[in-house]
Image (cartoon, rainbow, N blue to C red):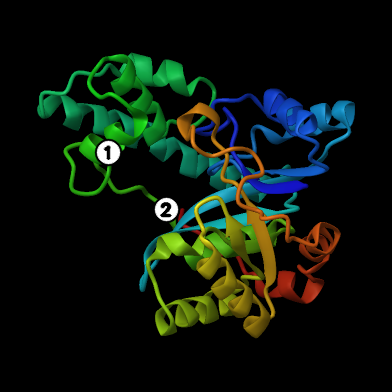
Amino acid sequence: MIDLHTHTTASDGTLSPEALIDLAADKGLQAIAITDHDTVGGIPAALERGKQRGVSVIAGVELGAQWEGAGQMHILGYYIDYKHPHLLERLSWLRARPRDRGEEIVKRLHAAGVMVTWDRVLQLAGAGSVGRPHVARALLEAGQVPSISEAFDRYLNPGTPGFLEKIQFTSSQAIELICSSGGTAVLAHPATLKLRNEGLEACIEELISEGLRGIEGYWSKHDKPEVSRYEELAAHFGLIMTGGSDFHGANKPTIELSAGLNGQLDEASVLRALKTRNTQALLQRCVVNLPV
């Protein structure tokens, strides 16, 4: 088994990189990708623990992005050079924004009469990037909501008092950053785009023109008809079909590590394709054009 979509305490997961690798080893996973939001900070520790536990660790990242036709999307990057200076500089620039956003979310909640402390949000985030799950957990601890999901529904999702748009790259910028760091770009959980048929195909076609090389067909919340649809799209467009749970630990308690893969991935072929698909020709096309 493999799991190509996981999060640690470096972003908004609740397991440290070491603890996540231990869990993967205990569950019998052969390989796992660390794909924290907008950071590669958890990769070194995960690689070291992977050597100790016999788990192959893939250096990855998940970048939030905006696409004009579908709004927010996520792009996964695999086999990136996580020490690449430009990647580190751009991620540092991007991660400074969640802290500002998180503090503004807390201020908005206070204005709405919802009491949660910024200090506690920072404590929950630890060394990782501040995210909405940390605010949600602080709301839960403060007795403002009965569950994490309720915190999002009442206070953190679009249309609620604490919602604030996230500063993100465009899809082209996210893909270019992954490519210029030697990685392979994959569209994460396409069902969340809320696009159907021609709209989804048009989106994928444009992303391919920007350098996309894969689609996350297997995901913990994709049902069988959706998986079949993404298999068809992957075959039609010549994309790598990947799978991952989107594991966050206690922040998404209903999602288990390696969930949603259905045992149907040709694991060796997928990993080989991800590692080799980003050819030198593609790298030459990825001219970095990122925000300053």
Q: Position of residue 118 (x, y in %)?
A: 31, 19
Residue 168's tag is 2
Is residue 79 visible to us here? yes
Residue 55 as seen in the image, left or right of residue 235:
right
- Cα–Cα gap, marks 2 and 1: 17 Å
Q: Judge from the rendering whether residue 78 lies leftward or rightward of residue 225; answer left or right.
A: right
Q: Label 1: how many residues lie within 10 Å, few (<14), some (14-19) or many (20+)?
A: many
- Which residue is denoted by mark 1 in the rendering? 156
Rendered residue at 50%/20% (across/down):
126
Image label count: 2
Q: Residue at x 54, y 31 (%)?
A: 13
Q: Residue at x 83, y 42 (%)?
A: 30
Rendered residue at 53%/81% (across/down) = 205
Q: Given this view, does label 2 or label 1 mark the residue nearer the observer?
A: 1
Image position of 188 (left or right of 123): right
Q: Is residue 273 left or right of residue 217?
A: right
Q: From what the image shows, is residue 5 above or below residue 198?
A: above
**Residue 254 at x, y percent in the picture:** 49, 37
The mark nearer the N terminus, 2 or 1, is: 1
For label 1, the SS is: helix
Q: Amino acid at mark 2?
A: Gln
Between 133 and 83, the residue placed more toward the observer is: 133
Q: Which mark is residue 38?
A: none
Task: Looking at the picture, tell me which residue is in the foreground, 80 or 254.
Answer: 254
Percent of width and height locating residue 40: 64, 39
Question: x, y (%) of residue 185?
Answer: 64, 63
CA neighbours of label 2 inside 10 A, class few (<14), some (14 to 19), many (20+): some
Q: Amino acid at mark 1?
A: Leu
> Which of the 4 image quadrants contains residue 263?
bottom right
